[in-house]
Amino acid sequence: DIQLTQSPSSLSASVGDTVTIACRANESISRYLNWYQLKPGEAPNLLIYAASSLQTGVPSRFSGGASGTDFTLTISGLQPEDFATYYCQQSYTTPRNFGGGTKVEFK
Amino acid sequence: QVQLQVSGPGLVKPSETLSLTCTVSGDSVRSGAYYWTWIRQSPGKGLEWIGYIYYSGTTNYSPSLNSRVTMSMDTSKNQFSLTLRSVTTADTAVYFCARSLSHGFMHVDYWGRGTLVTVSS
């Protein structure tokens, strides 16, 4: 199985900050890496697919990057509604495992 | 707008069977463009991919759950279902149903809200 290591597991930030979350795969997954946002009691939301493609309707402050087996999610100018937990997921092969998650909290 | 809604018991006894149904609106489960997917999140833990079912009946399950999981589809009701046998407290989780693309980058593009299932006597 492909394993994804996500870091940090949590971070504290303020509105307007730029934050970056990392996700590393233990083997090549090409660009089959997706990012989701989870808020308690809500349906999760796809943010980025194919490592850097912005899902329709997602604000442009969200961006994804890739270098080999290292991937990043960057939120440029954190907004109050962005305080949530973020997960990466590989869709290169099954099982389509997720990273451990990163909780973005208000500082 | 695609919507997915999970229904089923919120409490299941250990060793019994967990059964959930996902009702889809705004799309057809007979579409060959998607895998109909189940994902769960145990309390305080991360997301776990359970597997998917395709309109043809083809299924793909996580190896860690493969011996206990069955997924099925009822096209007349536009629903797909999850059955998990011999549950333990470790199966307590919020269960999500979702739609994944069956081509391209195969990401999950729509999720349901999720339902908490507690395994307890």
Image: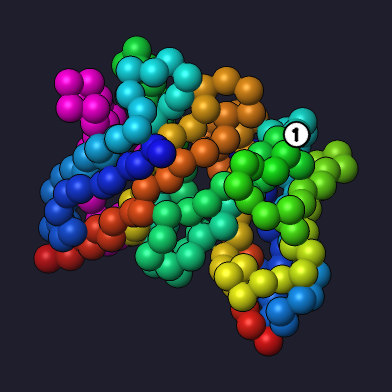
Q: Is residue B120 above or below residue A105?
A: above
**Nearer to me, A91 or B121:** A91
Instruction: Indicate whether residue B61 is drawn in magenta.
Output: no
Residue A59, percent across and down?
A: 67, 55
In the displayed orientation, state which residue is furthest to the top.
B56
Q: Quadrant of residue B116?
A: bottom left
| Residue A33 place in picture, x, y as percent | 68, 40
| Chain letter for mark 1 | A
Residue B84 magenta: yes
Q: Secondary structure at mark 1?
A: loop
Tell me the quadrant of the picture where the C terminus of chain A can be found.
bottom right
Image coordinates of residue A21 in percent, x first then y, are: 74, 61
Which residue is drawn at the image coordinates 72% and 39% (left, top)? A53
- Rate crowding at label 1 as few (under 14), some (14 to 19) or many (20 or more) other CA atoms within 10 Å: many
Q: Label 1 belongs to which residue?
A: A31
Where is B119 relative to A54, above or below? below
Q: Write the start and end of the magenta stretch as one range.
A: B65-92
Q: Residue at x 86, y 39 (%)?
A: A68
As rendered, which of A58 and A95 lies closer to the eye? A58
Residue A100 seen by the camera: no
Can residue B112 be seen by looking at this rendering?
A: yes
- Whether A20 is drawn above or below B85: the answer is below
Residue farthest toward the right in the current orientation of the protein: A67
